[in-house]
Image (tube, rainbow, N blue to C red):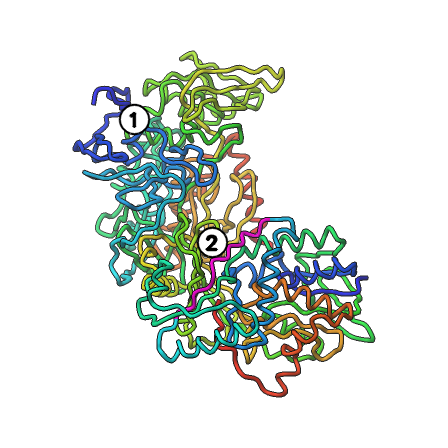
Amino acid sequence: MKDDRRIYEHPVLKFERGKRLSFYLDGKPMEGYENETIAAALHANGIKTLGFSPKLKRPRGFFCGIGKCSSCLMRVDGYPNERTCILPLKEGMKVEVQEGRGRAEIRGRERKGKVERRSTDFLIVGSGPAGLSAAAEATNMGFKTLLVDENPSVGGQLIKQTHRFFGSEREYAGTRGIDIPARLLGECAEKLLEIEKQASVFGFYPEGIAIEKRDRIELVEAKKVIVTTGAQENYLLFENNDLPGVYGAGGVQTLMNVYGVLPGKKALMIGSGNVGLIVAYQLLQAGVEVEALVEIMDHIGGYQVHAAKLLRQGVPILLNHTIIRALGDECVEGAVIKDIKSGEEQTLALDLICVAVGLSPSIQLLKQAGCRSAYIPELGGEVVLHDENYKTDAGIFVSGDGSAIEEASSAMIEGRIAAISAALELGEIEGAVEKRRELREELRSLRSCRRGEKILKGEEKLLEVYNER
Amino acid sequence: MSKTVIIGGGVNGASIAYNLAKLGESVTLIERGYITDGATGKCGGGIRTQFTTEETCRIALESSKLFDSLAEELACDIELRKGGYLILAHSDKELEEFKENVRMQNSIGVPSRILTVKEIEAFGVEPYDAVGASFCKMDGVANPFKVSFGYRDRAKELGADIRTHEEVRKISYNGGFEILTDKNNYGADFVVNAAGYESKKIADMLGVSLPIEPYKHEIFATEAMDHFLDPMLMSFSKNFYISQTVRGELVGGYSPLEAEPTEDLTPTLSFAIRAKKLFEEHLPQIKSLRLLRQWAGAYDMTPDALPILGPAGYERFIQANGFSGHGFMLSPFVGRAIASMITGSERYRDLVSSFSFERFKRGVKREKGVVG
């Protein structure tokens, strides 16, 4: 597989790809590795078009890379609408490009007939920085904890963060994001922690909390629930924005940093927030040329230190610029960008447009559970209301990007505060109140910067709406 | 001040508002939430003419015909698809009843017919325990949201005053009606009570007692698939219905026969699991489909499972409620009939006379086919 689009040399990452597997795309044999998802393996084989839209038959490709956007749906082993970005590759798999909605066939998904029940002290939904930190606190306080994640690996978005973290030492400042999940897992009391991967919590029912696994449904009874479902990438309106090759920044990170697959050869980055700046630099590290980074505002949104790294590598950061059109028929072949001050347009030849225009909290599960929400732009949009202990009015706790778009360091602290607060409702715990006070202090100091002010203002608004009722 | 105030912004309230406005009448509609917020937004979208009582068949037939030209009339797509209703008979006794129903239905112009087991299979439906079925090609499905919004939008254009997020608190009568909401005060000659199961609470405000009780019904929708199911598949004895929408989703509802009245509309997992199993017996394709959404709504049940259309307690306090699960499918007819009643026309008098509030004093017999 010499001609493939995999990354074999990387300044930070080593890819452990596992066993080589063969699979089929529309009957054509292809090769991939056991530690890849279907979408990653296809991309490595140069396949970007995964399906066609039902009505207009527009090509559809990869976008979010974390099972949230439904852009990568394909038919796998006869089953339509599989999210190929989170479904691991298996030997002999038959993958088909899906045209339209997919056929319903007379064949059963193998499921055990009975719904199984289980119980736990803590149920934590999502294994990102907030979820893992909450699990560490909960298990160390002696609570049996079930940690559920719909992705194939634990760690949420940490598993693709190759940069070193800022912030405080307790939140692993100076450590690369990719190394944090193992450290947090190491903090957990192992005997009390159960982890379910590739499992989705899909509803809070009168009968219990329902989890879907590939072969069955389980009903969980939990004394306390913490939801840390993270965020989903915002989209941007421009002509042809649905062409394969227009990928979310997080999706691009998944391809190149988790699976070691090149998302493209030449890229345009949209957005100069920290995500845009960091991912643009990571593209360079992976060997992708970054033609330009466009930012519609008149200033850079993220930290200067990240921007400086890009500028040193000669990547132009074009302020007052935006994308107005993607070019190409079946996938991206170029982009037209525009200077919004002068009106001047420029055409760039490239095969990757990376969208980094912010995130929105994934609050669907919490809304299903009956939590109230409000639109608070400072916190990333529609957010679930909670008190200062991160407790929602449905009694469920929330933390991390799922409660407000901030960063991994604050997510870790919030996860701990939520876990301690939930635990305190079950009884007194020595030193817990004091620890929570310290964590709150840490969070305050983390937010004592320009960006933190915005969050603080948002939190204030949130508490105000929360207390309105 | 409008001549008529309609309470309730479901599909029937919206249809009545549109039909009144079309006749040049002044009308105000008051809805507590948004248009379709109640049972309309939770219904399965079925349209059928195969009822077991002749008077219901007659109005359902009128309504079904009106649906055929509704998209044109409302100048919007209503996602109407008439693939028929296929109602399964699970015993010889049930099939005999269906034969009688079909005879009655045919006599008034409903083109229903009896299907053999082989003919059921020809529709791509597994008969499983069915011994036959009745089928009518005039039946089908449409999108309750699009129909309601169509009525609302055209009503507005014709001058109707549509008030949402406003709740009626008190109604009094003193030669005319006075309606007090949390925001305003309205006077009206006519009040139309189209508030679904909460019509009972509205009528209570005027000291009129309606025999309506809420029954919870749950529904699910699967992922959207290529079209494979033409008819709405239904069973009276198993109390379920399922159809495929124009958008490709399978929308199905099932309710236990032994349910009690309740206002608790929380969806349950046991419903989803039981319903899916029931449907799989007749549509094995369901096994490989994911359920994407589920929800519950309330039927506004009357003792005979038939609607209340016309005055109750006061000559000008008009009921359009008690639809018992058939409000959406009857709404094109109900809009016309109630508007006609208010404007003093005799046109629909005979058709609606069987649905008067007075019938409950005489005693009633229950309509058998209730679900869907």
Q: Nearer the viewer, residue B205 or A53?
A: A53
Q: Which residue is mark 2?
A: B245
Q: Nearer the viewer, residue B280 or A465?
A: B280
* Magenta stretch holds residue B78: yes
Q: Chain of mark 2?
A: B
In the rendered structure, which segment of residues is drawn in magenta?
B77-88
Res. B27 image quadrant: bottom right
Horizontal and vertical percent for residue A170? Answer: 35, 36
Q: Is residue B25 left or right of residue A329?
A: right
Q: Dot 2: few (<14), some (14–19), or many (≥20) neighbours within 10 Å?
A: many
Horizontal and vertical percent for residue B269? Answer: 38, 62
Answer yes or no: is residue A427 visible.
Answer: no
Vertical side of A63 occupied by B331: above or below: below
The circle on residue B52 is none
Marks 1 & 2, CB-CB < 8 Å contact: no
The circle on residue A261 is 1
**Is most of the magenta stretch helix, strand or loop?**
loop
Horizontal and vertical percent for residue A186? Answer: 25, 41
Q: Chain of mark 1?
A: A
* Magenta stretch holds residue B158: no
Q: Residue at x 31, y 34 (%)?
A: A39
* Secondary structure of the residue carrying numbered label 2: loop
Vertical side of A263 occupied by B299: above or below: below
Under mark 1, the amino acid is Val
